[in-house]
Amino acid sequence: MDALKLESLPHYTYEDYKGWEGDWELIYGVPHAMAPSPVKIHQKLMGRIFSLLDEMLKECPECEVLLEEDWKVREDLVLRPDVAVVCRDTETRYIAKTPEVIFEILSPSTADRDENLKYAIYEREGVKYYILVYPEELTAKVFKNREDGLKKVGDYTMETLDFTDVSCPVTFDFDKLFSRFR
C-alpha cells in the first residue's frame, strides 16, 4: 500500500462526469455517489422549500430557485445542492454562478459531507447563506458568509429569517416549512 500514491488515482473532470449514469457529485476530481433515493420527508421538505422560495421570488426576474441542479464550480468540482437560489446566471446547462442561498437536507448517509466538506466549499466559494435542514428534529441551522467565513446565525424551527443581502431580499418562514410535519 505504501507504493500507492495519490497522484496515481484517477482525476475526473466535468467531461467525464457528464457521461456517468446515476447520481454523482465530483469533488476535486473524485466521484462521490449520491445516496439512494431520499426518504419521503426529505423529498417533501425539499419541495416545500422550493415552493416557499419560488413564491417569494416570483416577482424577481434576476433570481431562480433550482432543485438538485448541478453547480459546476470548476472542471473537477461539480456539486448538486438540494435547493439553490441563483441570480443572474445565464448558463442553461448547469449552475455557473455561485448560488446566493443553498439548502441541504441532511440524511445519515450525507450528513458528514454536508456539514464538513460541502460547508468548506460553500464557504470558500462565497455562498451567502447555507442552511442545513435536519428532518428528524424539524430544525434548520443557518449560516451566513461574512468576511471571516460562514458563521452560524442560529437554529430555526418556527422563526423567520430575513435574507436582506441577496439580490432579491426575502423573508423565509421556518414555521411554514416545518408546520405540516409536526
Image (cartoon, helix red, strand yellow):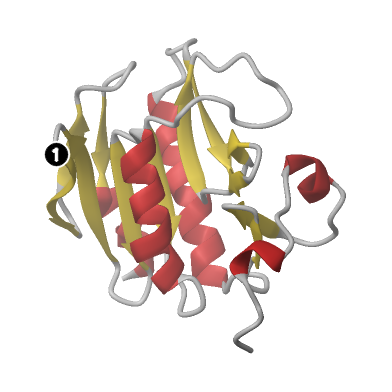
Q: Which residue is farthest bottom?
A: 1
Nearer-the-camera pick, 81 or 18? 18
User: x and y percent of residue 121 in the render?
Assistant: 40, 48
> SS for tag 1?
loop
The residue under the point 62% across, 72% down is: 5
Disc 1 residue type?
Asp
Task: Locate residue 142 relative to residue 15 in the image: left or right.
Answer: left
What quarter of the picture does the C terminus occupy? bottom left
Of 163 and 144, nearer the camera is: 144
User: In the rendered image of this protein, does residue 81 appear above or below residue 111?
Assistant: above
Q: To which residue does mark 1 refer?
A: 148
Report the number of discs.
Answer: 1
Q: Quadrant of residue 141?
A: bottom left
Residue 101 x, y percent position in the rendering: 37, 36
Q: In this view, does 86 lie to the left or right of 70?
A: left
Residue at 25% x, 43% y is 173
The quarter of the rendered structure image containing the N terminus is bottom right
Please rate how many residues cluster around mark 1, counting C-alpha atoms within 10 Å: few if below 14, some from 14 to 19, many from 20.
few
- The residue drawn where x is 41% and y is 71% is 111
Residue occupying image coordinates x 46% and y 80%: 108
Does residue 109 appear in the picture of this structure?
yes
Asked if residue 150 is positioned above or below residue 34 in the image, the reply reads above
Q: In this view, does 159 lie above or below 164?
A: below
- Quarter of the image for residue 168 reads top left
